[in-house]
Image (spheres, grey):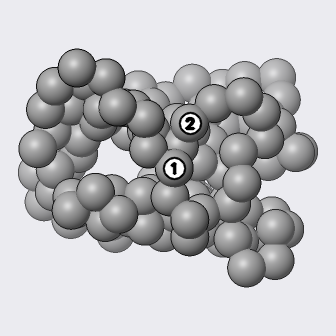
Amino acid sequence: MKKTVSAKDLPAALGPYSHAVWAGDFMYCSGQLGIDPATGLLAGDVASQTERAMENIKTLLSSQGLKLTDVVKSMVFLADMGHFKAFNEVYGKYFPSEPPARSCVGVAALPAGALVEIEVVAHR
């Protein structure tokens, strides 16, 4: 059974997609940028954008009764792999033990000029 999710406390989608989709006991979350939902603006540097994206992910998970500990996989897209260390320093604070499996790739560009985009899969 498929069920779409739209969380009211997140930035509006930048295109025709849902914030997340449930498929059985797994929730597949669309990529989150470091956009502040209150202002609609991107945070500053890659560390700030990573923190904001992770807070957006926490909000999305919480809207469905989930926590970061329910995340089983994350996919990270960096506009510059030179930001890998700064990204990891912030990301690691959100997963201090038993972090999820993860992929991280460098990309040519991200929507809205973002420096990082993070998507996750969570299990209930």
Q: Residue at x 21, y 31 (%)?
A: 26
Q: Which residue is mark 2?
A: 18
Name the spot of residue 99 as percent of width and height, x first.
20, 48
Classify residue 57 as left or right of residue 35.
Answer: left
Q: Which residue is label 1 attached to?
A: 6
CB atoms of marks 1 and 2 within 8 Å: yes
Establish if 16 lies above or below 10. Answer: above
The amino acid marked with disc number 2 is: Ser
x, y percent for residue 42: 80, 64
Which of the labelled discs sits on residue 29, or is there none?
A: none
88, 70: nearer the viewer: 70
Q: Report whether 73 appears left or right of 44.
A: left
Along the line of sight, which residue is nearer the eye, 11 or 113?
Answer: 11
Eyeballing the image, is 112 above or below 23? below
Taking the view exactly as shown, the residue that stands out farthest to the right is 113
Residue at the image point whose x is 66% and y is 37% from the top: 78
Instruction: Assign the N terminus to one quadrant of the image.
Output: top left
The image shows residue 77 at horizontal and vertical percentages of 60, 33
Q: Residue at x 69, y 71 (%)?
A: 37
